């Protein structure tokens, strides 16, 4: 069975603080994808990143960085120097690489509130 | 930027009524997904299609929900009869083969 756990339901930080959102996953597949999506207050789901299980290199994109560790089945997301516009619900998700059509299994989401 | 288009954005209706939600996937995307988001269950997959063929609808209540793709530019999700527990945000997403999914803005459904 596949499962994604985001243990942090809500996080509140003050602007310019760094914040890390945790994601732990379970899968029996040896090959899979991991994702992060952002859902701002307006409600849409915005794709942020996809990593495949072959590639454990960390990735940085501007103020965003992702740490993928297969040994601990974790795919954590860090926002550096947070801004009010980062306030949103962030979802971690998992999909099989080659079968099941790419359907996403989502975590419950972490609501991030960045205060000025 | 190409976008997945969902209509209507909001729908309020009384229980027992038929509800039809529509989705126009991004041109060239051959895989279409329907997800439902509720406070209790979070985001869960209802059904998905590849090249218009249904691949998995195990997430849908079969007795009242149906999903179809009459053509490559339209996917529909119907609920008949609707019940208050169907109140949720319904998202459509599309993707080219083996690529990340792009989501529409969702249909916020309220069944009174």
Image: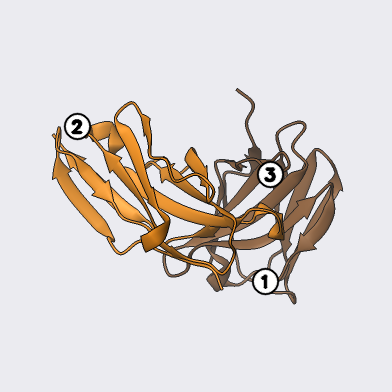
Chain colours: A orange, B brown
Which residue is pictured at 78% across the width and 42% down the height? B30
Circle 2 crowding by C-alpha within 10 Å: few under 14, some 14–19, many from 20: few
- CA distance separating discs 2 and 1: 50 Å
Residue B12 seen in the figure: no
Q: What element carries label 1?
A: loop
Check contact, mark 2 vs mark 1: CB within 8 A: no
Q: Name the residue under label 2.
A: A81
Front: mark 2 or 1: 2
| Side of A81 relative to A68 (left or right) | left
Labels 3 and 1 in the same subunit: yes
| Side of A31 relative to A57 (left or right) | right
Which residue is pictured at 61% across the width and 43% down the height? B101
Relative depth, front residue between A116 and A77: A77
Q: Name the residue under label 3.
A: B98
Q: Mark 1 points at which residue?
A: B16
Give the quadrant of residue A15. Answer: top left
Which residue is pictured at 54% across the width and 48% down the height? A54
Give the quadrant of residue A83. Answer: top left
Labels 2 and 1 in the same subunit: no
Reading the chain from its start, which is encountered first: label 3 or label 1?
Answer: 1
Q: In which quarter of the image is the N terminus of chain B?
A: top right
List x then y, in percent, for residue A27. Answer: 53, 67
Is A96 located above or below residue B23 in the figure?
Answer: below
| Side of B98 relative to A2 (left or right) | right
Which residue is pictured at 49% across the width and 47% down the height? A35
Circle 1 crowding by C-alpha within 10 Å: few under 14, some 14–19, many from 20: some
Q: Is mark 3 on a helix, strand or loop?
A: loop
């Amino acid at each position: 069975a596949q499962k994604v756990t985001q243990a942090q339901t809500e996080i509140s930080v003050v602007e310019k603080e760094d914040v890390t959102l945790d994601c732990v996953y379970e899968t029996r597949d040896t090959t899979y994808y991991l994702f992060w999506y952002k859902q701002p207050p307006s409600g849409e789901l915005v794709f942020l990143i996809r990593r495949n299980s072959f590639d454990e290199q960390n990735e940085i994109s501007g103020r965003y960085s992702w740490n993928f560790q297969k040994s601990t089945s974790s795919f954590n997301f860090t926002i550096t120097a947070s801004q009010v516009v980062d306030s949103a619900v962030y979802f971690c998700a998992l999909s099989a690489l080659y079968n099941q059509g790419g359907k996403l299994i989502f975590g419950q989401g972490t609501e991030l509130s960045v205060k000025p | 930027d190409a976008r997945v288009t969902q209509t209507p954005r909001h729908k309020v209706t009384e229980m027992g009524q038929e509800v039809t939600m529509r989705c126009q996937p991004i041109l060239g995307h051959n895989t279409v997904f329907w997800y439902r988001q509720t406070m209790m269950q979070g985001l869960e997959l209802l059904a998905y299609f590849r090249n218009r063929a249904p691949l998995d609808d195990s997430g849908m209540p079969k007795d009242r929900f149906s999903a179809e793709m009459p053509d490559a530019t339209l996917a529909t999700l119907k609920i008949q009869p609707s019940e208050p527990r169907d109140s949720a945000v319904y998202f459509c997403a599309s993707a080219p083969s083996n690529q990340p999914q792009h989501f529409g803005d969702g249909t916020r459904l309220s069944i009174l």
